Image (spheres, rainbow, N blue to C red):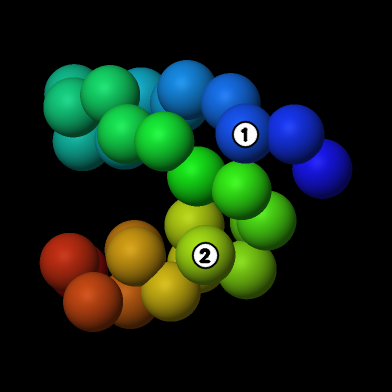
Amino acid sequence: MSVREIRLFGDPILVTPSSEILDFASASG
């Protein structure tokens, strides 16, 4: 999966796998 820019909580972040998104969301929320 290529790196893409997504907007999470209004802040653009760079993530690679979807698992990192869940990990980031867990750490933030």
- Rendered-image quadrant of the N terminus: top right
Mark 1 — residue?
Answer: 3
For badge 2, the amino acid type reads: Glu
Residue 9 quadrant = top left
Q: CA distance from mark 1 to mark 2?
A: 11 Å
The quadrant of the image that shows the C terminus is bottom left
Q: Classify residue 29 as left or right of residue 5.
A: left
Q: Residue 23: percent from the left, percent from the top?
A: 43, 74
Name the residue beneath numbered marker 2.
20
Q: Residue furthest right?
A: 1
Does label 1 or label 2 sit earlier along the sequence? Answer: 1
Q: Residues within 10 Å of mark 1 (few under 14, many from 20)?
A: few
State the residue at coordinates (75%, 34%).
2
The residue under the point 32% across, 34% down is 13
> What is the three-letter code of the residue carrying label 1?
Val
User: Is 23 positioned to the left or the right of 4 in the image?
Assistant: left
Left or right of 6? Residue 2 is right
Q: Position of residue 27 (x, y in %)?
A: 23, 77
Residue at image position (67%, 56%) is: 17
Q: Quadrant of residue 4?
A: top right
Residue 18: mark in rendering? none
Q: What residue occupies the far front of the structure in this picture? A: 2
* Mark nearer the viewer, 1 or 2: 1
Q: Secondary structure at mark 2?
A: helix
- Horizontal and vertical percent position of residue 21: 49, 57
Left or right of 1 on screen, residue 21: left
